[in-house]
Amino acid sequence: MTAGAAFSRGLEGVIAAESALTYIDGQKGILAYLGIPIEELAEHSSFEETAFLLFYQRLPKRAELEGFQSELIRHRALPEPILDLLKRLPRTAAPMALLRTAVSALGHFDPKPDDVSTTALQEKALRLTAQMATLTAAIGRLRKGLEPIAPTTDLSHAANFLYMLTGQKPTEEATRVFDVALILHADHEFPASTFASTVVASTLSDIYSSICAALGALKGPLHGGANEQVIRMIIEIGDPSRAESYIKEKLARKEIIMGFGHRQYKTYDPRARILKRYSERLAQQTHDTRLFQIEEIVEKTVIEALGGRGIFPNVDFYSGTVYHYLGIEPELYTPIFAVSRIVGWAAHIMEYLKENRIFRPTTRYVGPPLGHYIPIEQRT
Ligand code: SDX
């Protein structure tokens, strides 16, 4: 215990690092990567360009972007033993747990896993970004008893993922929607997963260990795992006519409503606003508006009850229906979060290691006062 140090449960309000990557104004609902508002990136950028932006802290020139895209494509394929390993693991295992195992195993195929020099980390970050998508698509197929599909070399990151998952080249519309979802999830300052990965990296451990820590943190339902819980709740509600009473009953039981609330935002999460628009558009295009209608009523009911306390939809609320309308099953929603967030995790690790200092906070001691060891025969 350090005398005089402040204690904040859950580290609320504690500045744990300096970062130039992501800016959040949680009162005004502003989010920007390297100063560029998320709305503009969602409108004009691609996942690949956003990944470059976060890795190198600037937008790429055309030739740089093309080079970056080619490198991502070059690294898409997985080592054969990784696919064999995934095939041998129980089909019933949680996809996030499979992803964590696979990322750990990927480290064994890196000839220099412990190299944390800037150049080595840039290469590893790029490779992990490429392979997180391939792993997730393979897990998605294997759990349904299907063979994984090898990546293409002519599709964008978003389109190739949908292709590897379904075996069909996606439409331009589906590709764009998925690309935007990836852009929106790429980074978010210092959430539990990014903090966890940076803590591991600060010991100068290898990046695979750091990313496994991040995956473990993201998996939890209070963090990235919330997107799967949201869609399960919406499906359970089943009909718009039940939505309001379902939520009111939950609130009366003091249960938390997944997809709402945020440590940083005390207003509408700007990513949720964008995802809501896409969710609505897809609902209309697929002539299947039931789930979207339920979400709108859930949103209204929660905001009426808790909006005054700063509780609004977060990124995990509308992402589920976007993926649902793209034909993706709920078990993959959190792994898809990781397909994008690998960029933020790696970018923060690279940034932090430039001026590394090991993370070592302290606890406020609340145990017994200093005493003495009591021999077993004297214990009453
Ligand atoms: C993500 O941090 C990030 O940036 C994460 C993320 C990213 O991009 O990386 O944005 C992604 O993880 C989004 C969050 C996904 N999680 C959920 O949707 C789960 C539901 N939400 C929560 O449990 C909660 O809001 C958290 C975990 C998101 C935030 O937790 P905090 O900041 O510790 O807030 P809290 O739990 O202390 O809540 C404060 C009060 C409590 O009431 P009181 O005890 O003060 O009476 O608000 C209430 C809470 O009960 N509250 C909710 C609520 N969220 C907060 N009540 C009902 N439903 C909710 N969803």
Image: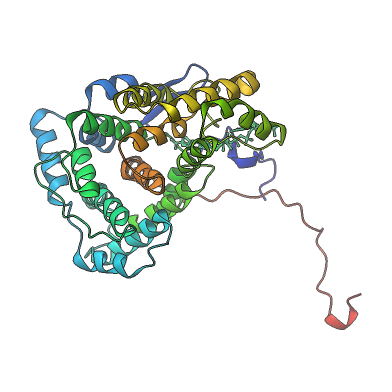
Looking at this view, name the residue that lies furthest to the bottom. Answer: 377
Q: Residue at x 10, y 39 (%)?
A: 67
Looking at this view, name the residue that lies furthest to the top. Answer: 28
Task: Give coordinates of residue 310: x percent, y percent.
Answer: 59, 22
Q: Is residue 85 left or right of residue 169?
A: right
Task: Give coordinates of residue 109: x percent, y percent.
Answer: 23, 65
Q: Nearer the viewer, residue 205 or 288?
A: 288
Which quadrant of the figure shows ligand 1?
top right
Q: Vertically, is 293 above or below 327?
A: above
Q: Residue at x 39, y 43 (%)?
A: 333
Q: Nearer the viewer, residue 26 or 218?
A: 218
Q: Nearer the viewer, residue 223 or 205?
A: 223
**One can see residue 40 in this view:** yes
Task: Give coordinates of residue 124: x percent, y percent.
Answer: 24, 52
Report the coloring of the rendering: rainbow
Quadrant housing the C terminus: bottom right
Q: Is residue 225 left or right of residue 178?
A: right
Q: Quadrant of residue 100?
A: bottom left
